[in-house]
Amino acid sequence: MTRFSTVKKFSTWSGYSESAIRTKILRNVWPENLVWFRAPDNRILIDLKGFDRWVASRAMAGGQRHHSRNNLDSSISDAGSDTNDG
């Protein structure tokens, strides 16, 4: 596998839609020259090593901004288990 990938190929491999990838680039969620680069022909290329570093850095920093599905499910079941015996 090559280090750099087009947006289309990266979308297929990663599961991110092409639109989501472009949005992450436009919003600077994925910094230029770290996660993505512009080729000499001005095409956007995703750096697979840079993407891996971005994922690992978010995981190490506790970078989840949203509750995970498991946390949400346990919160719902905990709320439903309150019983009123009185």
Image: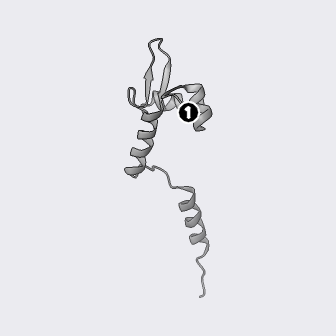
The C terminus lies in quadrant: bottom right
Nearer to the camera, 74 or 13: 13
Q: From what the image shows, is residue 41 above or below residue 63?
A: above
Identify residue type, mark 1: Ala
Instruction: Judge left or right: residue 42 versus residue 13.
Output: left
Instruction: Judge left or right: residue 83 versus residue 64.
Output: right
Looking at the picture, how far across and down is residue 56, in whole percent? 42, 45
Nearer to the camera, 85 or 35: 35
The N terminus lies in quadrant: top right
Write the residue at 47% across / 14% down.
42
Furthest-top residue in view? 41
Residue 17 occupies which quadrant of the picture?
top right
Nearer to the camera, 70 or 51: 51
Residue 83 occupies which quadrant of the picture?
bottom right
Secondary element at image label 1: helix
Looking at the picture, how far across and down is residue 24, in whole percent? 48, 32
Write the residue at 58% across / 77% down.
82
Q: Is residue 65 visible?
A: yes
Residue at numbered disc 1: 20
Looking at the picture, how far across and down is residue 74, in whole percent? 57, 66
Instruction: Judge left or right: residue 38 versus residue 8.
Output: left
**Colour scheme employed for the rendering of this structure:** one colour
Q: From what the image shows, is residue 8 above or below residue 29?
A: above
Write the residue at 46% across / 36% down.
51
